[in-house]
Image (spheres, rainbow, N blue to C red):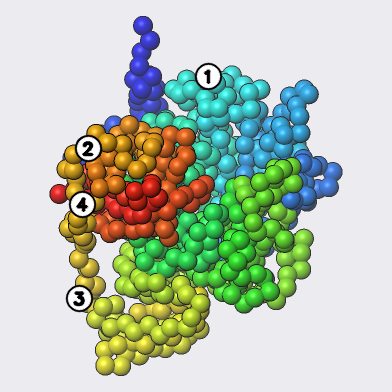
Amino acid sequence: MKRNLRSLLAVAIAASLAACNSADNAVDVAGVNSNAYLCDTTMMTQSDDLRIYQIMVESFVNGDSSIGHGTGYGTSHHKGDLQGIIDSLDYIESLGMNAIWLTPIFDSIPVDGQDHWADRLDATGYFTSNYFAVDPRFGTMDQARELVEKAHEKGLYVFFDGVFGHHKGNVVPSPQGRLPAGENNPVSYPESLEFYQEVATYWIEELKIDGWRLDQAYQVPTEAWAAIRASVDQASKSVSYVNSEGETVNPLGYMVAEIWNNENYIKETGYGMEGNPALCSAFDFPVRYRVVETFAVNENSIGNKGGKWLDEGMSLHSLYPSHAKPNLMLGNHDLVRFGDLLQRGNIASPEQPEYWNRHKAALSFQAAYSGPITLYYGEEIGDELDGYANKVEQDCAVRGLCDDHVARTSANIEGITATLDENQRDLKQYVSQLMALRADHPALSRGERSNIVANETVYVDHKQADDDTLLYMVSTTAQSDTVVLKASEIASEGQLVDLLTGKIYSAVDGKYSIKLEPFEAKFLSIEKPSAAGLMKAAAATSASLMGEGFMAQCDNPAVDSAGPVGKTLFVVGDFVDAGWKHKPNRAYSYVGNNTYQAVVDEKAGAYRMQYASKDWSPQFTADGLELSPGKIATLKRGGYGKDTAVTLPEAGKYVWSLSFSDSGEPEQLMVSKCP
C-alpha cells in the first residue's frame, strides 16, 4: 500500500530540517510550529536593501563573439554570454544597484534531431540538462567564478535562477549520483528533493553565489521549499568571501519566488502559513500590475487608474504572513516593457516628455517601496522595441514579437553597446539618484508605510524607520496639482526638505502646500517629526461592503423558470479555489426579476474575473472593468483580457448578482457581503 505523498514529503523534510534547525529557529510558542524552519533574521533585514538588476543572459551583451546560442525568443542578437555581463559590471554598479540576477546559465544539452523551437528553449536556460555545469554557449566555469568574484568586489550580490520544478528530460546525474524523479514538467516531490537540495547548495559552495530566483515556484510543494531553504541557509553559513568593504561575510542566502498570481495564491503556494514559512520572499506581481495600470496600461491595455488603486494594492500585503518579503518589479523577460505599454495604451512615445515623466513616476514608486526591488535591464533608460506596441498574434513567436518574448531585446549598455541620447541619460541619472536615496534612507527600503492621501490624482505615503522619517508623493495625472497637507496629519512640527532638489517647505497656518507637476515624484524629509506620531485611520466596516435592494439579498430563493439567459453562468476568475475553472459552487441560479445570483464563501483579496458559461459564450464583465463591493455597476459583454477587478477586504459570504433585460442583454451587476 502506497503511503500518502504528503506524509512521505513530511518525513523527508523533517530529516532535512533536523540538521538545520537551532534553538533560535524552532520556536515553541502559540501559532508557531516548533518544527518549522523560520526565515533567517539577518537575511531578512539585509534583503530589504536589495536593489537587483535582472539580466536575461542570452539577450544581454555579446562579450565573446566565438560563442552564443545564436537563436532564441525575442528580437535580440541571441549571443549574450558571461563575458558580456563581466564587461557591464561597472555600468550596473554606476546605477546604484547592489545585486544582479542572471537567468539560468546551466547546460541545456541538445537532443539529437531537436527542432528550432527546442533550440530556442535551450537559449533561455529554463529547461536544463546539467544543473552542475555552465552552458558552453554562455561561457566557462572559470568565467562564472570570475563574474561572481568581480561582482562581489564591486558590492554586488549575485543570484542564480533556480528551476527546481521542471527540466528538459535528458538530465545529467549530480556529483552525488542523484536525479530528479517523476515527469519532466513538473517533477515529483519528495523523490526529487535531495537532487534539488544538492543543486541549490552546490553553486553556493562552489562559487559563493548569494541565493536564488525560483522559477515557477508553485510547482514545488511548500514543505519542500522549507527544506531547500534550510539547505541554502546551511550552505551559505559554511562559506565566506570578502565584500567591497573589506569585510569577510557569508553569502546572503536570499531566495525569491516567481508566482505569477494574486496575493492568496502566492501565500498558499509560496509563503506558506503564519508560523510555518515555506519561502520568505516572492515577486509582487499584484502590485506590479497596479503600478503599470496607474502610470501606463497593462498588457491588455487596461489603465487610467490612480492613487487609490496603488494604496489598495499595497494594503493587501496584510493578507501575507508576517514573514513575507514581497519584491517589486516593473517588468521581466516575460512581460512587455513599460515603454512599449505606454505606446500600447496610446499614451506617449519616446519623442514626448510624458513618456519619460511616466517612467520616472513608476520608478519612483519602486524606490519608495519597503522591501527588495528588481529592475529589468533597459528600464533605467526607458528602453522599448521600436515599432512594437499592439499585440501581434500570428507567427509572433517566429518573429520574436509575442508579449512574453518582446522584452528580450539586446541590451543598450552605455559605453559597451550603445551611446545614449539625452532623454536616456537623464532617466539613467534619475535612477542612480533614486537608488542612492534608497541606500541612504532606510525609511524607503524598510520603513513602515502609512498612506496619507490616495485619490485619482495623487498618492502620498508617510515612511518611517527608526529616526528616518519622510514623505513620498507622486502625481498620477497629466495635470499639475497642489497638494495641501496638514502638519498634524503627517506628524510634522518643522520643515520638509526635498531630498532630490534641496527645496524647503514650511507650514503656513499648520499646512504645507506642495506643487506637483504631471507625474512628478517628491521625497520629502520630515525634519522634526511629532512625538505623538501619526494618527491611524479607521478601518473600513463590513457595512460598507453591503449593498441595498434585491441584488444585495443573499437569501433570494431560486425559481423554476430559466430566465432571459439560456445557459448556466459562472463566476470565473483567479480565485484560489477555482483558478479560472467553472466550479459548481460558483454557478449562478436564477432568482427572478431577470436576476442571477451565486452565494460563495470568499477569502479576502483582490481578484479578476468574468461571468461566463462553460463554453465562454456568452461572457460578461463590468463596464470600466472594476467593481466595488456593495455598489451596482453596469454589466457588458466581455472578452479575452477584459476582466473585472474587485477587492474584497474581508473574508466572508458574498452574493454575486447579474441582471439582464427581457431579451437577455446585460444590464447590471453587484457583489455584496452577506450579513
Question: Spatial distance from mark 2 to mark 3, Cα to Cα?
Answer: 55 Å
Camera-nearest label, 4 or 3: 4
Residue that numbered label 3 is attached to? 532
Residue that numbered label 2 is attached to? 558
The answer to the question of whether label 2 and label 3 lie on touching residues, with beta carbons closer than 8 A, is no
Residue 454 is left or right of residue 236, and the answer is: left
The answer to the question of whether label 1 and label 2 lie on touching residues, with beta carbons closer than 8 A, is no
Placement of 564 over or under 411, stated as above or below: above
Callout 3 secondary element: loop
Pick the front one: 41 or 110: 110
Mark 4 and mark 1 lie on one chain; the one further toward the N terminus is 1
Mark 1 and mark 3 lie on one chain; the one further toward the N terminus is 1
What label does residue 182 carry, if any? 1
Q: Which of the image's four quarters has the N terminus?
A: top left
Residue positioned most to the front:
663
The answer to the question of whether label 4 and label 1 lie on touching residues, with beta carbons closer than 8 A, is no
Question: Spatial distance from mark 1 to mark 2, Cα to Cα?
Answer: 47 Å
What label does residue 270 carry, if any? none
Residue 450 is left or right of residue 419, and the answer is: left
Residue 339 occupies quadrant: bottom right
Mark 1 and mark 2 lie on one chain; the one further toward the N terminus is 1
Residue that numbered label 4 is attached to? 550
What residue type is disc 3 on? Ala
The answer to the question of whether label 4 and label 3 lie on touching residues, with beta carbons closer than 8 A, is no
